[in-house]
Amino acid sequence: MNIGILICGHFSDDIKARYGTYRDLYADMLGPGYACRPYFVVDGEFPASITEQDGWLVSGSRSGAYEDHPWIPPLEGFLRDAYAADVPIVGICFGHQILAQALGGTVEKYAGGWSFGPVEYRFRDGPSQTIVAVHQDQVTVPPKDAAVIAETDFCAFAGLAYAGKALSFQPHPEFSTAFITDLTEAYAERLTPEVLDQARQGLDQPLDNGVMAAQIQAFFQTAAGDPSL
Protein backbone atom coordinates (compact mmCIF):
# COMPACT_ATOMS: atom_id res chain seq x y z
CA MET A 1 0.00 0.00 0.00
CA ASN A 2 1.34 3.43 -0.96
CA ILE A 3 1.08 5.96 1.86
CA GLY A 4 1.80 9.66 1.44
CA ILE A 5 3.37 11.21 4.53
CA LEU A 6 2.22 14.83 4.77
CA ILE A 7 5.10 16.31 6.77
CA CYS A 8 4.03 19.39 8.71
CA GLY A 9 7.25 20.18 10.59
CA HIS A 10 10.99 19.72 10.73
CA PHE A 11 13.08 18.16 13.47
CA SER A 12 16.14 19.96 14.81
CA ASP A 13 19.40 19.06 13.09
CA ASP A 14 20.52 16.98 16.08
CA ILE A 15 17.31 14.95 16.21
CA LYS A 16 17.23 14.54 12.43
CA ALA A 17 20.83 13.29 12.38
CA ARG A 18 19.96 10.56 14.88
CA TYR A 19 16.47 9.55 13.79
CA GLY A 20 15.80 10.91 10.29
CA THR A 21 12.60 12.71 9.29
CA TYR A 22 8.98 11.97 10.13
CA ARG A 23 8.88 9.86 6.99
CA ASP A 24 11.54 7.53 8.41
CA LEU A 25 9.75 7.17 11.75
CA TYR A 26 6.39 6.42 10.14
CA ALA A 27 7.89 3.97 7.67
CA ASP A 28 9.42 2.08 10.60
CA MET A 29 6.11 2.22 12.46
CA LEU A 30 4.06 0.85 9.53
CA GLY A 31 6.62 -1.78 8.58
CA PRO A 32 6.63 -4.09 5.53
CA GLY A 33 3.81 -3.77 3.05
CA TYR A 34 3.78 0.02 3.04
CA ALA A 35 5.72 2.30 0.71
CA CYS A 36 5.95 5.75 2.30
CA ARG A 37 6.53 8.85 0.21
CA PRO A 38 7.15 12.18 1.97
CA TYR A 39 5.53 15.46 0.99
CA PHE A 40 6.90 18.44 2.91
CA VAL A 41 3.66 20.39 3.04
CA VAL A 42 5.27 22.66 5.65
CA ASP A 43 7.46 23.90 2.77
CA GLY A 44 4.59 24.10 0.29
CA GLU A 45 5.16 20.67 -1.32
CA PHE A 46 1.74 19.12 -1.91
CA PRO A 47 0.61 16.02 -3.82
CA ALA A 48 -0.79 16.58 -7.29
CA SER A 49 -4.07 14.94 -6.31
CA ILE A 50 -5.81 13.27 -3.38
CA THR A 51 -5.55 9.90 -5.18
CA GLU A 52 -1.82 10.10 -5.87
CA GLN A 53 -1.32 7.66 -2.97
CA ASP A 54 -3.57 4.98 -1.51
CA GLY A 55 -3.79 6.79 1.83
CA TRP A 56 -2.41 9.73 3.77
CA LEU A 57 -0.69 10.11 7.13
CA VAL A 58 -0.44 13.64 8.56
CA SER A 59 2.55 14.28 10.84
CA GLY A 60 3.23 16.26 13.96
CA SER A 61 4.45 19.86 13.89
CA ARG A 62 5.73 22.65 16.10
CA SER A 63 3.08 24.89 14.52
CA GLY A 64 -0.44 25.38 15.81
CA ALA A 65 -3.33 24.36 13.57
CA TYR A 66 -4.90 27.77 14.25
CA GLU A 67 -1.78 29.76 13.31
CA ASP A 68 -1.52 31.89 10.19
CA HIS A 69 0.82 29.88 7.96
CA PRO A 70 0.41 29.83 4.16
CA TRP A 71 0.47 26.03 3.98
CA ILE A 72 -2.33 25.41 6.51
CA PRO A 73 -5.40 26.44 4.43
CA PRO A 74 -4.38 24.29 1.44
CA LEU A 75 -3.65 21.39 3.78
CA GLU A 76 -7.12 21.71 5.30
CA GLY A 77 -8.64 21.81 1.81
CA PHE A 78 -6.66 18.73 0.76
CA LEU A 79 -7.84 16.82 3.84
CA ARG A 80 -11.47 17.80 3.31
CA ASP A 81 -11.30 16.67 -0.31
CA ALA A 82 -9.61 13.36 0.58
CA TYR A 83 -12.14 12.74 3.34
CA ALA A 84 -15.08 13.47 1.03
CA ALA A 85 -13.63 11.02 -1.52
CA ASP A 86 -13.13 8.28 1.11
CA VAL A 87 -9.35 8.27 0.69
CA PRO A 88 -8.10 6.98 4.07
CA ILE A 89 -6.39 9.47 6.39
CA VAL A 90 -4.45 8.99 9.63
CA GLY A 91 -3.48 12.00 11.74
CA ILE A 92 -0.87 12.04 14.51
CA CYS A 93 -0.55 14.90 17.05
CA PHE A 94 -0.71 18.05 14.86
CA GLY A 95 -2.17 15.77 12.18
CA HIS A 96 -4.90 14.76 14.64
CA GLN A 97 -5.58 18.43 15.34
CA ILE A 98 -5.51 19.79 11.78
CA LEU A 99 -7.81 17.00 10.56
CA ALA A 100 -10.31 17.81 13.31
CA GLN A 101 -10.11 21.53 12.53
CA ALA A 102 -10.50 20.94 8.79
CA LEU A 103 -13.65 18.91 9.42
CA GLY A 104 -15.31 21.45 11.70
CA GLY A 105 -13.74 20.89 15.11
CA THR A 106 -11.88 23.32 17.34
CA VAL A 107 -8.18 23.29 18.29
CA GLU A 108 -6.76 25.51 21.03
CA LYS A 109 -3.69 25.97 23.17
CA TYR A 110 -4.77 24.15 26.29
CA ALA A 111 -4.91 26.15 29.52
CA GLY A 112 -3.45 23.18 31.40
CA GLY A 113 -0.11 23.53 29.60
CA TRP A 114 2.10 20.71 28.36
CA SER A 115 1.54 17.00 28.18
CA PHE A 116 5.05 15.63 27.70
CA GLY A 117 6.53 12.15 27.91
CA PRO A 118 4.93 8.72 28.26
CA VAL A 119 1.20 8.96 29.06
CA GLU A 120 -1.41 6.27 29.69
CA TYR A 121 -4.38 6.67 27.33
CA ARG A 122 -7.71 5.06 28.17
CA PHE A 123 -9.44 3.41 25.22
CA ARG A 124 -13.22 3.02 25.22
CA ASP A 125 -12.98 -0.32 23.40
CA GLY A 126 -9.84 -2.04 24.61
CA PRO A 127 -7.03 -1.82 27.16
CA SER A 128 -5.12 1.34 27.99
CA GLN A 129 -1.98 2.19 26.03
CA THR A 130 1.12 4.07 27.18
CA ILE A 131 2.30 6.29 24.32
CA VAL A 132 4.49 9.41 24.15
CA ALA A 133 2.76 12.81 24.31
CA VAL A 134 4.37 16.07 23.16
CA HIS A 135 1.80 18.86 22.97
CA GLN A 136 0.33 22.03 24.39
CA ASP A 137 -2.48 22.31 21.81
CA GLN A 138 -5.35 19.87 21.67
CA VAL A 139 -8.76 19.31 20.14
CA THR A 140 -11.29 20.96 22.46
CA VAL A 141 -14.39 20.40 20.29
CA PRO A 142 -14.37 17.35 17.97
CA PRO A 143 -16.10 17.36 14.58
CA LYS A 144 -19.66 16.03 14.54
CA ASP A 145 -18.59 13.01 12.47
CA ALA A 146 -15.89 11.97 14.97
CA ALA A 147 -16.31 9.30 17.62
CA VAL A 148 -14.04 9.57 20.66
CA ILE A 149 -12.05 6.36 21.13
CA ALA A 150 -9.27 7.43 23.53
CA GLU A 151 -8.89 9.95 26.33
CA THR A 152 -7.01 11.04 29.44
CA ASP A 153 -8.02 13.38 32.25
CA PHE A 154 -5.77 16.00 30.59
CA CYS A 155 -6.85 15.35 26.97
CA ALA A 156 -10.51 14.46 26.54
CA PHE A 157 -10.34 13.89 22.76
CA ALA A 158 -7.06 12.00 22.38
CA GLY A 159 -8.29 9.51 19.80
CA LEU A 160 -10.94 10.06 17.13
CA ALA A 161 -12.44 7.67 14.59
CA TYR A 162 -14.35 8.88 11.54
CA ALA A 163 -16.64 6.05 10.36
CA GLY A 164 -13.89 4.06 8.66
CA LYS A 165 -12.72 7.07 6.63
CA ALA A 166 -10.13 8.54 9.00
CA LEU A 167 -8.40 7.79 12.28
CA SER A 168 -6.35 10.13 14.45
CA PHE A 169 -4.41 10.16 17.71
CA GLN A 170 -2.96 12.93 19.84
CA PRO A 171 0.08 10.89 21.03
CA HIS A 172 3.07 9.77 18.97
CA PRO A 173 3.30 5.98 18.40
CA GLU A 174 6.33 6.63 16.17
CA PHE A 175 8.40 8.06 19.07
CA SER A 176 10.61 5.50 20.81
CA THR A 177 11.97 5.70 24.35
CA ALA A 178 15.34 6.81 22.96
CA PHE A 179 13.68 9.50 20.86
CA ILE A 180 11.62 10.98 23.72
CA THR A 181 14.65 10.81 26.03
CA ASP A 182 16.62 12.99 23.62
CA LEU A 183 13.63 15.24 22.95
CA THR A 184 13.03 15.75 26.68
CA GLU A 185 16.53 17.16 27.09
CA ALA A 186 16.16 19.28 23.94
CA TYR A 187 12.93 20.78 25.36
CA ALA A 188 14.18 21.11 28.94
CA GLU A 189 14.31 24.92 28.90
CA ARG A 190 10.77 25.19 27.47
CA LEU A 191 9.12 23.03 30.12
CA THR A 192 8.19 23.89 33.67
CA PRO A 193 10.24 22.07 36.33
CA GLU A 194 7.16 20.01 37.23
CA VAL A 195 6.50 18.88 33.65
CA LEU A 196 10.19 18.18 33.05
CA ASP A 197 10.48 16.12 36.23
CA GLN A 198 7.36 14.14 35.39
CA ALA A 199 8.62 13.48 31.86
CA ARG A 200 12.00 12.26 33.10
CA GLN A 201 10.39 10.02 35.70
CA GLY A 202 8.27 8.37 33.02
CA LEU A 203 11.09 7.51 30.64
CA ASP A 204 11.49 4.00 32.04
CA GLN A 205 7.88 3.06 31.28
CA PRO A 206 7.46 0.51 28.48
CA LEU A 207 5.63 1.95 25.48
CA ASP A 208 2.70 0.35 23.67
CA ASN A 209 3.74 1.72 20.27
CA GLY A 210 3.21 -1.62 18.61
CA VAL A 211 -0.41 -1.76 19.77
CA MET A 212 -1.30 1.65 18.36
CA ALA A 213 0.71 0.94 15.21
CA ALA A 214 -1.35 -2.23 14.72
CA GLN A 215 -4.54 -0.16 14.99
CA ILE A 216 -3.25 2.18 12.28
CA GLN A 217 -2.17 -0.73 10.08
CA ALA A 218 -5.56 -2.40 10.51
CA PHE A 219 -7.31 0.84 9.55
CA PHE A 220 -5.29 1.17 6.34
CA GLN A 221 -5.76 -2.53 5.54
CA THR A 222 -9.52 -2.31 5.99
CA ALA A 223 -9.70 0.86 3.93
CA ALA A 224 -7.71 -0.83 1.16
CA GLY A 225 -9.82 -4.00 1.35
CA ASP A 226 -6.67 -6.12 1.52
CA PRO A 227 -6.10 -7.92 4.86
CA SER A 228 -2.89 -9.46 3.51
CA LEU A 229 -0.97 -6.15 3.66
Image (cartoon, rainbow, N blue to C red):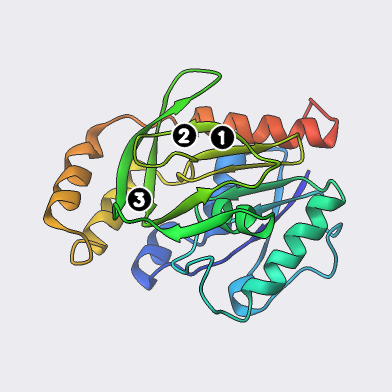
Please tell me how crowded label 2 is: few (under 14), some (14-19), or many (20+) other residues with Cα within 10 Å. some
Secondary structure at numbered mark 3: helix
The span from disc 1 to disc 3 (Cα, nearest Å) is 17 Å
Q: Quadrant of residue 16?
A: bottom left
Residue 208 horizontal/vertical position (percent): 43, 29
Asked if residue 137 is positioned above or below residue 208 in the image, the reply reads: below
Q: Is residue 217 left or right of residue 198?
A: right
| Residue denoted by label 3 | 179
Three-letter code, disc 3: Phe
Q: Is residue 137 left or right of residue 201?
A: right
The residue that appears at 23% across and 37% down in the rendered structure is 202
The span from disc 2 to disc 3 (Cα, nearest Å) is 13 Å
The residue that appears at 36% across and 57% down in the rendered structure is 136
| Residue denoted by label 2 | 209
Three-letter code, disc 2: Asn
The residue that appears at 55% across and 44% down in the rendered structure is 28
Three-letter code, disc 1: Ala
Secondary structure at numbered mark 1: helix
| Residue denoted by label 1 | 213
Q: Quadrant of residue 11?
A: bottom left
Residues tagged 1 and 3 counted as in contact (Cβ below 8 A): no
Please tell me how crowded label 3 is: few (under 14), some (14-19), or many (20+) other residues with Cα within 10 Å. some
